[in-house]
């Protein structure tokens, strides 16, 4: 029962990792951009939520109604104003620019909010739990977080394969110049993709901030979790990303049970092992 | 009579390399013209420039009297110019039907709908849910033409639609062109298959090393005049 419990907790946190990963995977899929600032944008979303919850006196989950559109707007502006200019044949400029952006966000947050640890208070719901099986307790908040993660992944999948916007994403990813012949302004398509990515980042950021303490420096570690989940799941597959997040979460939970110091290490070791035996991930997109 | 499309003395470059030298061309509504020439003569460059994928350094392109010289491709299509690109270039991650639907993205109204495309190319209707790469070369070409028609253009640019296809398939596709033109469309056909192009078109332009070497109604041209312009002998 102890191990079942541990695996369950790992699965639930895996949903959060999948949300870290989904936005990353989306951006890479549509425009081959590796967003090094992704983790810091998650932390930025947490701080935006902090301001909204304190300023308006709402709980963190309600703050999503504002944080999601704010982050989406930031994403659109960031892509149109900055990142579109870095895209081209060479993959290095977007890497360098997002790396720089990561440093700017970290230091900007440090300047505004200091290095103090913060936490979003969700109230009574934080400690509510129910007994699933004898001795297996499930927290209500982690369960909501997991359910939202599944909904986000399902929503992205639906959007990608059953809407005009998703069609535009896939077409632009296939062939930019022919996409333009179809009347698609690729600068706008890319900006919509980044807006969507940061909308997911907003949800991930708020749940992260309710779960754990955060400060301006924790972004890069979340980026690593996101990367690992994407690679384990296989590039280009949304459900694979969820599987990747769960595998990472379970590995960390088991590692932590063996020795608390092994939590992160266990996750990285499993990631490296999977990379060694199955470098394409578990559910790579079937290329045509 | 005001031309539908007027290309006036355009110079087009790839970096320092000049691909087109003062090329002029005109097409009236309902006309089919052919642009022929050897490899590297600048035929595809001319079409890409008209479609807005490339822009002339000098010269002017007017469509229905309005300048589209510096207009980006995604706006040009909304004005009514659609390109069937060389090599078909269907979107491999989209199904056949999605490829057609994305062609209709610009939402210009007109006679071409999904149903009409399937009527014109019935084989596409059977294979609508397959991924585009699962089609044969000829079917892919039909899908590429259908995708361009979905934008309901007034001017359709066809770049080497016979390339890599069996002669019987080429004849099949060319047999549909009059049906397409009957909707009031004008066509510019770029071809290396001269006989095919001359049969379909009323006027022909022959490009040679980026310059117009010969132009005129197809009826008035002899084989000797064309081969002289084609090879520059």
Image: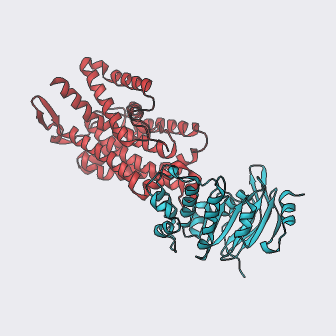
Residue B120 vs A43, above or below: the answer is below
| Quadrant of the frame with the N terminus of chain B | bottom right
Residue at 58%, 56% in the rendered image: B138
Residue at 18%, 41% in the rendered image: A123
Residue A85 percent coordinates (x, y): 57, 47
Residue A141 percent coordinates (x, y): 20, 40
Q: Colour of chain B?
A: cyan
Examine the image and state in which quarter residue A267 appears. Answer: top left
Q: Colour of chain A?
A: red
The answer to whether residue A44 shows anywhere in this view is no
Residue B25 percent coordinates (x, y): 75, 69
Residue A197 vs B231, above or below: the answer is above
Task: Judge by depth and name the residue closer to the eye, A256 or B24.
Answer: B24
Residue A146 vs A52, above or below: the answer is above
Residue B5 vs B147, above or below: the answer is below
Residue at 43%, 40% in the rendered image: A24
């Amino acid at each position: 029962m102890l191990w079942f419990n541990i695996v369950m907790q790992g699965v639930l946190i895996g949903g959060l990792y999948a949300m870290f990963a989904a936005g990353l995977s989306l951006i890479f899929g549509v425009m081959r951009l590796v967003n090094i600032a992704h983790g810091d944008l998650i932390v930025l979303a947490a701080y935006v939520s902090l301001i909204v919850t304190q300023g308006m006196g709402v709980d963190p989950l309600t703050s999503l109604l504002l944080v999601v559109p704010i982050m989406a707007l930031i994403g659109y502006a960031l892509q149109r104003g900055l990142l579109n200019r870095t895209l081209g044949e060479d993959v290095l400029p977007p890497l360098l620019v997002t790396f720089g952006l990561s440093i700017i966000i970290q230091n900007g947050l440090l300047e505004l909010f200091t290095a103090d640890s913060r936490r979003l208070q969700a109230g009574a719901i934080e400690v509510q739990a129910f007994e699933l099986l004898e001795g297996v307790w499930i927290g209500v908040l982690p369960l909501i977080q997991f359910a939202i993660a599944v909904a986000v992944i399902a929503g992205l999948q639906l959007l990608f394969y059953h809407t005009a916007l998703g069609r535009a994403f896939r077409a632009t990813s296939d062939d930019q110049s022919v996409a333009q012949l179809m009347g698609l302004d690729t600068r706008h398509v890319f900006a919509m993709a980044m807006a969507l990515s940061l909308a997911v980042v907003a949800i991930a950021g708020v749940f992260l901030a309710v779960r754990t303490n955060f400060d301006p420096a924790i972004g890069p570690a979340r980026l690593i979790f996101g990367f690992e989940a994407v690679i384990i799941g296989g590039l280009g597959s949304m459900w694979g990303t969820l599987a990747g997040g769960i595998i990472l979460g379970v590995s960390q939970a088991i590692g932590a049970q063996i020795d608390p110091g092994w939590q992160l290490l266990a996750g990285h070791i499993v990631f490296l092992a999977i990379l060694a035996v199955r470098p394409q991930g578990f559910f790579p997109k079937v290329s045509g | 009579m005001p031309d539908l499309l007027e290309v006036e003395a355009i110079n087009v470059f790839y970096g320092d390399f000049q691909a087109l030298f003062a090329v002029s061309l005109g097409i009236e509504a309902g006309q089919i013209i052919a642009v022929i020439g050897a490899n590297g003569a600048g035929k595809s460059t001319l079409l890409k420039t008209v479609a807005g994928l490339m822009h002339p350094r000098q010269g002017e392109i007017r469509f229905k009297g309005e300048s589209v010289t510096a207009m980006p491709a995604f706006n040009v299509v909304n004005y009514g110019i659609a390109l069937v690109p060389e090599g078909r270039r269907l979107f491999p991650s989209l199904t056949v039907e999605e490829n057609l639907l994305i062609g209709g993205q610009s939402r210009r109204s007109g006679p071409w709908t999904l149903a009409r495309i399937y009527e014109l190319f019935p084989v596409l209707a059977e294979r609508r849910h397959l991924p585009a790469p699962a089609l044969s070369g000829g079917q892919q070409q039909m899908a590429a033409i259908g995708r361009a028609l979905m934008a309901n253009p007034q001017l359709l640019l066809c770049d080497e639609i016979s390339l890599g296809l069996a002669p019987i398939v080429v004849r099949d596709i060319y047999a549909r062109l009059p049906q397409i033109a009957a909707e009031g469309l004008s066509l510019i056909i770029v071809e290396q298959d001269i006989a095919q192009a001359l049969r379909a078109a009323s006027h022909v332009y022959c490009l040679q090393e980026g310059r117009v070497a010969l132009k005129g109604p197809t009826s008035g041209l002899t084989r000797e005049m064309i081969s002289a312009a084609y090879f520059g002998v």
